[in-house]
Image (cartoon, grey):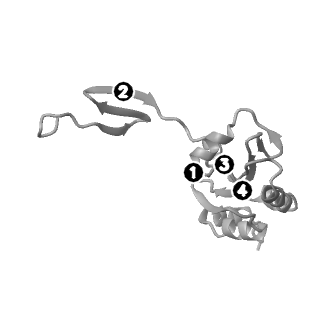
Amino acid sequence: MTRGGGRRAGFFLCAGMIVANASGGIVMGQLEAAPLDHLRGQNRVIVMFAGAPDEAALARQQRLLSDAAAGLLERDLVVISASKAAVVVDGIEREDLDAARLRQAYEVPRQGFQLILIGKDGGVKRRSAEPVAVDDLFALIDSMPMRRREMRERTPRAVR
C-alpha cells in the first residue's frame, strides 16, 4: 500500500518466474526464453534479417559468408537468415523459429536488412544495416576474450 491508501503495482523476478503485484493480486508465469537461448554457450550467431528472401543486401551478405565456410566453422558460428517467408539456419529451413519473434527479441525493424552478431554469452556484439565484410566480423570475434582463450587452447604447443 502507498501512503495515500492506494495500491502500488510492482514487479520482481523470483527464480525464473515473474511475480506481479497489481491491484492486490499476484500473478505468476514462466519467463519466456529468448528464441536463440539454446545456442548460448555453444555457438556465436550471425542473424541476417531481410524483408524478403531475395533482398539484395541479404544475398550479398550470404555470398560473403559462403566464401568463408572454414572460418565460420572454426569460430563456432551458426548463420541464420530471417525473412517474412522463412527462417533458415545453416541452410536448412526451420519451422520452429519465427522471424517476427526474432525481430522482436533483437529489436529489429520490420523492413530492410540488418545483420546482428551474437556472442556465445548471448549478447549482441555488432549490428549493421549493411552487409559486413567477413574479415571485419572475424576480427571482432577474434578480439573477444572467449575466442582468444579458444585459440590458445586449440593451438598445439611445441614439444621440448
Q: Which residue is mark 4?
A: 113
Looking at the picture, does residue 3 appear above or below residue 57? above
Q: Give the CA distance from mark 4 to mark 2.
A: 39 Å
Q: Earlier in the sequence, mark 4 or mark 3?
A: 3
Q: Amino acid at mark 4?
A: Phe
Q: Earlier in the sequence, mark 4 or mark 2?
A: 2
Extreme residue toward the bottom, this view: 160
Report the residue at 40% width, 34% height from top: 18
Please tell me how crowded label 1 is: few (under 14), some (14-19), or many (20+) other residues with Cα within 10 Å: few
Say whether residue 74 is left or right of residue 7. right
Image coordinates for residue 8, horizontal then vertical, percent: 23, 37
Q: Amino acid at mark 3?
A: Gln
Report the residue at 28% width, 36% height from top: 9
Please tell me how crowded label 2 is: few (under 14), some (14-19), or many (20+) other residues with Cα within 10 Å: few
Q: Which residue is mark 2?
A: 27
Q: Give the CA distance from mark 1 to mark 4.
A: 13 Å
Q: Give the CA distance from mark 2 to mark 3.
A: 34 Å
Q: Amino acid at mark 1?
A: Glu
- What element does badge 1 sit on? loop
Q: Give the CA distance from mark 2 to mark 1.
A: 27 Å
**Labelled pair 1, 3 in contact (Cβ < 8 Å):** no
- What element does badge 3 sit on? loop
Q: Amino acid at mark 2?
A: Val
Which mark, by number, is residue 42? 3
Q: Which residue is mark 1?
A: 107
Looking at the picture, does residue 9 appear above or below residue 126? above
